[in-house]
Amino acid sequence: MDEFGWMSRRELLRAGAAGALAALLPGRLLWGDAANAAAKIWVFHGPDKTRLMNACLNVIDQNGGLGRNVRKLTLKVNAAWARTPRQGANTHPELVDAFLKGCRKRGVRDLVLPEHPCDRSEESFTQSGLQAVARENHARMLDLRKEKNAFIPRNIPRGKNLRRADVAREVLETDALVNLPVVKHHGAARMTAAMKNWMGSVHDRGAWHRNQLHQCIADFSTLVQPRWTILDATRVMLDWGPRGPTRNMKIPDLLILSRDPVAADAYASTLLSPRGPGDVRYLVIAGRMGLGETDVEKMSVKKIEVE
């Protein structure tokens, strides 16, 4: 383990030397302690985005996988903005490509990427590189503004300000739901990552801004519970979010994985502010509502160096 606490592939293999798991492909990492229920966060570091996602998928496999008999998987990326991958406003297409390919290898037949974009989908889906990746992997990328019967009305079970919303059918009707947003600055919410990414799955996103945005973000998280949250922190906009372009780009080269989206966001918030979750009001609210862990010191964080 190095001075920053990162474990190398060799150390990972030594830590979990179970023979049945030793024969892994290059770039796919063995995590010996993945079965530990207390391990809430995995943080993968490395410059190769395909290897990052393959390592992430391997940990998912060792912790219950995508679920049983998953034929349809809905992947909620961030594809809202007419920006290039380098500009960091959307989920990086190389990560999405590796994830979709991994799903195909795991037997998932129907892959769906729904998005209610802010910019025109003809621009945001193409400039982001995500439309091309979806087509290459025979996945359906949907502009929710154009789909018929795209939304289903739902009551928000513990909503205080947001008590009802029209939610994307593909988010509600699926065998497995995975959230794969980008981490970045947001002018109104301070940060956008997992919890706020669900605004791209509702019909009236403006209602959140009109009705105390931070509370609405927390409220909606009582309805939608993804099986896995994977945060793209390979590059992070530190200002002028959510659209950019930023004047200040950070390059952490990280993926953050958790079953707890609140914990994932809380950990990611430390990349934008020294105060971490205390500087993001919707995380403070989520902690008070008991929606997930917001105290980074209480998290079991496993750091994995992907070579």
Image (tube, rainbow, N blue to C red):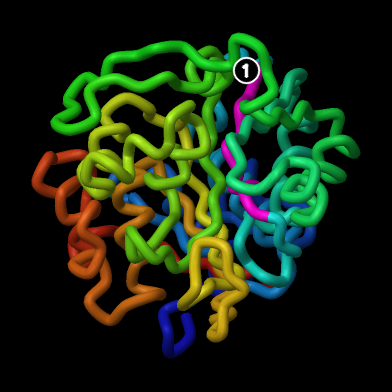
Amino acid carrying label 1: it is: Val
Report the magenta stretch's main SS. strand
User: Would residue 285 appear left or right of 187 to someone viewing this image?
Assistant: left
Question: Is 87 situated above or below 91?
Answer: below
Circle 1 SS class: loop
Quarter of the image with the C terminus in it = bottom right
Residue 256, position as x, y percentages in the image: 48, 58
Q: Would you say residue 191 is visible in this rendering?
A: yes
User: Would residue 301 appear left or right of 147 to someone viewing this image?
Assistant: left
Query: For residue 101, what is the image quadrant?
Result: top right
Which residue is located at x 31 percent, y 35 percent?
221
Residue 175, position as x, y percentages in the image: 56, 16
Residue 300, position as x, y percentages in the image: 29, 59
Which residue is located at x 56 percent, y 46 percent?
180
Question: Is 238 situated above or below 301?
Answer: below
Which residue is located at x 34 percent, y 73 percent?
270
Q: Is residue 115 magenta?
A: no
Residue 35, position as x, y percentages in the image: 41, 43
Question: What range is drawn magenta here?
Answer: 72-81
Question: Is 90 situated above or below 289?
Answer: below
Residue hosting label 1:
70
For the image, the number of numbered tags is 1
